[in-house]
Image: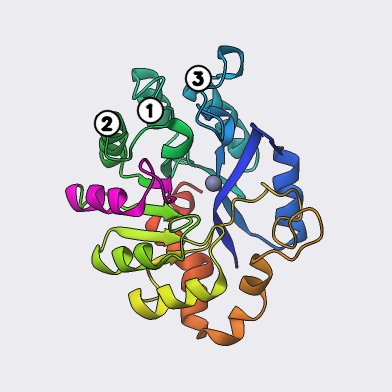
Amino acid sequence: MIIDAHTHTGCMLNFIMTEEMLLESMDKYNIDYCLCSNGEATEFDHNHYLLPANMQKTQESVYRTNLKFARANRDKIGVLPWVKPYLQGVTDELERLIAENLDITFGIKLHPFHSVTRFDSPRVQDYIRLAQQFNLTVLTHTGMGEYDNCTVVAKMAEKYPDVSFVMGHMGLGTDNSNAIELVSQYPNLYGDTAWVSMESAIRCIEKCGSEKLIFGSDNTIDGVDTYDNNGKGSPSIYRKYFGELKAILSKEDYENLMYKNAVRIYRLSKLRDKC
Ligand SMILES: [Zn+2]
């Protein structure tokens, strides 16, 4: 069983990630279930220029598209709505949509880099309190910048001890050491493996225990074969997760990483309860 707790759909900046591509890749690489955030709620481009108005969609309309996809594929897809702290903030409509779709909504996705908004800003904290209210997990992109560094996320984990925080990428562009240290310190702070080397994942499990790391990939950011190569034939880091890591970790640790932690931390069991 494999659950990928960090995937995307949508046409976002230079990435084309259709719903069909995600389903095809799940089939091809034996992924049982994905938590998916539609990336069309991106606010700024890679150079921190605000996207023009004709490229901005509301967080609610993007969430609705995400929900429709998940409803049509309920046994395969769950939703982490990608929100817009810079242009919108928490709205009544978003709150109502979450309340109406709690059975397939498992968290809130923030991208401080593409929202040019610090993770500890008041606007982001409004979303954290929304997650708290609905018992949802907060997934955030983490990198090495002023908006998205792991230390700022840890500060929020300390301030909101009853909310689970997942640091996507465990500090993209870093050697993951700071993220691993922080994950070891806060019980409600977790990491995911999107673009994290197998070696860093092993270090994380050795230091923090196998309950603190969740398999995630950013699929289908490099196309249908994101799990296998970068779209140009170079091997993907995920090959090792599906291959040699199985022989390195104990069965229990491997299962925690590849699906059991996602079930627990994102409370996926409510899916089963509703069936
Ligand atoms: Zn991502």
Bin the neighbour count of mark 1 within 10 Å (Cα to Cα): few under 14, some 14-19, many 20 and up: many
* Colouring of the image: rainbow
The nearer-to-camera label among 1 and 2 is 1
Task: In the rendered structure, find residue 126 and report the number of the disc placed on it.
Answer: 2
Respond yes or no on whether mark 3 lies under 8 Å from ligand 1: no
Q: Secondary structure at mark 1?
A: loop
Q: Does any atom of ligand 1 lie closer than 8 Å to the CB of label 2?
A: no
Tell me which label, 2 or 3, sits earlier in the chain.
Answer: 3
- Asked whether disc 1 touches disc 2, contact meaning CB atoms under 8 Å apart, the reply is yes
Residue toward you, 192 or 162: 192
Circle on res. 58: 3
Task: Residue type at mark 2: give it.
Answer: Asp
> Is residue 111 visible to us here?
no
Numbered-mark total: 3
Q: Residue at x 58, y 48 (%)?
A: 7
Residue placed at 35% from the left, 64% from the top?
178
Q: Give the alpha-carbon distance from disc 1 to disc 2, as whole Å.
A: 9 Å
Which picture quadrant has residue 242? bottom right
Mark 3 secondary-structure assignment? loop
Can you identify the residue that label 1 sits on?
85
The magenta region covers 139-159
Residue 207 point in image, percent of width and height = 35, 78
Residue type pointed to by label 3: Thr
* The one of 196 and 36 positioned closer to us in this rendering: 196
